[in-house]
Image (tube, helix red, strand yellow):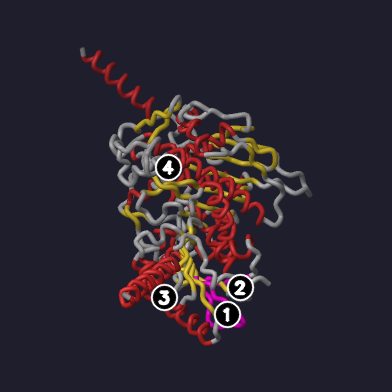
Amino acid sequence: MVRKHRFVARVLSVALMAGIGVLQVCAQGTVPPSLQGSFLQPGYITSAGQTSDAAIVKVLANTRLKLGFGYDIAAKPQSIAGAKTLVLVLGASNKGLGAAGLSLEQDIERVKSVIAEAQKNGVRIISMHTGGTARRGEASNQVIELCVPVSDVVVVVEGGNNDGFFTDLCEKAGVPLVEVASISAAGNVLKSLMAQQ
Amino acid sequence: MKRLLAAWCFLVVFSSVQVHAQTGLELVCSEVVAGEGVTAVRPLSDFFPGLRGTPFDTPVFVMGDGARGTEGAEAPPCAAIVAGTHANEIAGVLASYWIIERCRVPEGRLVVVPRVNASGATWSLQDASGPRFLELGSRTIRYGTRLSNPAQERLADPGSFVPPQASGNFPALAGQEARNLNRQYPGRQDGNRTAQTAYALTLMLQAEEVRIALDLHEASMTSSLVWSMITRPEHLDAAALAALDIEDETGVSFHLEDSRDEFAGYSHWEWGKLGISAFLVETPNPAQPTDDPTIEQLHNAAAPLAKRVYVHLCAAKALIANAADLLQDAGALRIEGFPSSVEEVGRWLEGTL
C-alpha cells in the first residue's frame, strides 16, 4: 500500500515538474518570477544577423522605456565593455548584411565573438525575436540556433514561433522562453526583466 | 463602298486614339473627388511638360498652406504621399484617396499623388486592352498592373535595363523593368514615358521642398516584404518609432528593411539622395503576384481590403509624425482626419460612411 502511494507520489511529482517546465517555456507573456528584475544595467543591444528589427528594440528600450541601453547593430566584443546585460535581436536580413558589408558567415563570427566576451565577463544574455515569419528561414535559423542555447531568457513575438522552433530549442537548452503577442509586449517583458535602478 | 469603308476605319482608329489619349488626370479624377482639405490640384506635367496630354500625366493634390515660408521665417515642412506606383497595389491608392477626400492639413503642407503611374491603371495582366474594375459600394476603381502600359510608351522595351544611377557593376534587369516606375528614379528627361514620369516626380519633390515622402505598396502574401517598411539607415529610428505606433493602433507588427545602393532606381533610395526622409510601406495583397481576378478583395478572409487601407493610413500618420519630430529645423506639420478604426474604413469603402 505504502509502495503504491510512493509510486503515485513519484508520478505526480514528475508530472508536476514537467508541468512547471512546460509552463516555463510556454506561458504567454509571463516572465518566470526568478528572472524578474534579475538583469542588471547597463544593457547593450546588438543584432544577430543584421536585422533592422534591432532598431525597433532600440527605440522600444531607449525612447519608450527609457532604459538607456547602448546600441550598435554590428557591435564588436569591445563594444560591450562594462555592460552587464546583452540583448541579442535575432534575425538574418540580406539587406542588413549587405548594408553592413558582411556575409552571414562573417556576422555569425562577429556574434560568436560578442557572446564569448559576454560569457567571459559574466554578462547575462537576453535574446529577442520580433520579426515574425519574415525573420525565419534557413539563414535566420542559423543565428537563432547559435544564440538561444547561450541565452538566459528568450523573448519571441507571436508568429516567429509558429512552428515551435524556439520551443524545441529552448526546451533542449533549458532556457526559459517568453512568448508575447506584440513588440510592445516584448518591451514590457524586457522592462520586467531589468532590475529597478 | 470604299469611301464608306475608309470612313468606318477612320472612326474606329479615331475612337481608339481617343480612348488611349485619356490622360491620367481624367482617369484619377473619375475615381476620387477632392475634399475640403485640398487647396490645389496640379498636373504632374506642370513639373515636366513632356508628360502633358499623355496617359502618364497624373494629378498632384496639394493640401494645407500652399505658400512657402517667408524669407527668414521657418518654412512649413512638406510631406508627400505617393501611391499607385504599381497599379495592382490598390490599398495604397485607396489610402491616398481617403486622405484626399477626408483629411485636412491645418499646419504645414502635404502633397498626394494617388496614382503616380496612371498608365499602369489602364491595362491588366488578363486583358491588355483594359483594366479590371473593382466595385466598392458606390465607388469603382481600376485594378491595373505592376508595369506601365506598353501601348502607351514612346519607346520599345530595351533588351535589358539598368536603373539611371546604378553603379557600374549593377546587374542588368529584364527589359520590361524599364516600365517599372520603382526602378526608374530619379528618372530621365529623354527616357521612355515611365522614366519621364519618375523625372517629373523627382522635380515635383524638389519644387515642393518635400522633406518626408512615403511610397505605398503591396506584396504577395508569401513575400518577406509583407508588413515591412524600407528606408535608408539614417531614417530607421523614425521607422522604428512608427512601427511601434502602428502596432499599438492596428495590432500589426511591422518589420524594417535597410535601403542601400543595390536599390538604385527605387524610391526609398533615390528620394533619400535628395535629402528626403523616404519610406516605402508594404501591406499584403492576396491576389498578387498573378493578379488573380477570382480573389475577392473587399472581404478577403486573409487580408481584407479595409484592414490594408487602414494600416496604410496608420503608417502614413505614424511615419510623418515621427519623421517630422526627428527633423531638427522643421516647423509643425499636422494632418487631421485619419480614420479611428478599420470598421470606419470598411464603411467608407462600401459607401455607407
The residue to which callout 1 is attached is A80
Disc 2 residue type (three-letter): Gly
Report the front residue among B269 and A115: A115
Is residue A84 part of the magenta span, yes or no? yes
Sequence-wise first label, 2 or 1: 2
Residue A99 visible at all:
no
Q: Which residue is mark 2?
A: A70
Is label 4 or label 1 in front? 1
Residue at image mark 4: B193
Q: Is residue A38 above or below residue B216?
A: below
Task: Count residues near mark 3 (Cα–Cα under 10 Å), then give few for <14, some for 14-19, many for 20+.
Answer: some
| Residue farthest to the front, as pictured | A1
Quick check: marks 2 and 3 in contact, CB under 8 Å?
no
Separation (CA) of disc 4 from disc 3: 61 Å
Callout 4: SS: helix
The picture quadrant where one finds residue A95 is bottom left
Taking the magenta stretch, the answer to whether it contains residue A78 is yes
| Cα–Cα gap, marks 2 and 4 | 48 Å
- The answer to whether marks 2 and 4 sit on the same chain is no
Q: What's the magenta region?
A: A69-88
Between the residue at mark 2 and the residue at mark 1, the CA separation in whole angstroms equals 8 Å
C-beta proximity under 8 Å, tags 2 and 4 = no
**Residue closest to the far bottom:** A120
Q: Position of residue A166 (x, y in %)?
A: 39, 67
Q: CA distance from mark 3 to mark 1?
A: 25 Å
Specify the subunit that label 3 lies on.
A
Q: Amino acid at mark 1?
A: Ile
Q: Which mark is residue A174?
A: 3
